[in-house]
Amino acid sequence: MAGGSGGGAALPARRSKWGSPVPLKRPRIEIIPLIDVMFFLLASFMMVSLSLQKAETFKMDLPVASTARPDFKPDMLNIGVEKDGRVSIEKKYLSFEELDVILRERLQKNTNTPVYVTADRAALHGQVNRVLERVRGAGVLKVSFVTDAADPAVPAVPPAKSQP
């Protein structure tokens, strides 16, 4: 055995008769974290592929209306109340006496004439109530109020003023 490093057969590792204090575990693949990683990769690739698609539309020449439809139908009566209290029918301002005459004429032609009251947002309740009294006094039993969808930027009720 001169000049060598042993070269002979290796001796088997010695085991003690009591065993190792650390139990030997067989390596295994954990499936739950593997599924999580695969779902993450799948979602990432889907998002990247969706961002690469371009949404294109066709260029079209849309027709332009040459005449607009009238706002008011002839078989209905739309009464407008402005913020300063003026009353209008079909964009014509009139007094309460003229309103009474028009209401009676329309109801003589058709007793089921639909009546709509459209008030400005800044109109006072008393002004709208005066118009409603005139409509009820003419014999209209069913009155509808036309409302807009509330704009979230504009408060529906103005804040109360504090008095000193």
Image: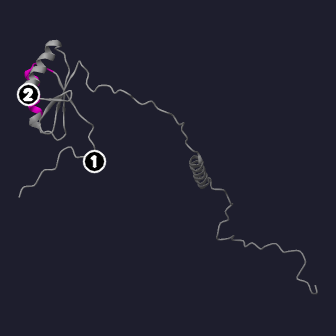
Quadrant in the rendering for residue 147: top left
Question: Which residue appears at 68% of the width and 65% of the height?
Answer: 24
* CA–CA distance in space, label 2 to label 1: 34 Å
Cβ atoms under marks 2 and 1 closer than 8 Å? no
SS assignment at label 2: helix
Q: On the rendered image, what quadrant is the N terminus found in?
A: bottom right
147 relative to 139 in the view: left or right: right
Read off the residue under disc 1: 153
Q: Is residue 140 visible?
A: no
Of callouts 2 and 1, which one flags the residue occurring earlier in the amino acid sequence? Answer: 2
Quadrant in the rendering for residue 114: top left
Q: In this view, does 39 lie above or below 124?
A: below
**Magenta part of the protein: which range?**
128-141
Q: Where is residue 2 in the image (x, y as percent from the top left)?
A: 94, 87
What color scheme is it?
one colour
Q: Between label 2 and label 1, give the one nearer the viewer.
A: 2
At label 1, counting other C-alpha atoms closer than 10 Å, the crowd grade (few under 14, some 14-19, many 20 or more) is: few
Q: On the rendered image, what quadrant is the C terminus found in?
A: bottom left
Q: In this view, does 105 lie above or below 151?
A: above
Q: Position of residue 83 (x, y in %)?
A: 15, 39
How many marks the image carries: the answer is: 2
Q: In this view, does 11 lie above or below 63?
A: below
36 relative to 77 in the view: left or right: right
The amino acid on which the numbered mark 2 sits, given as a three-letter code, is Phe
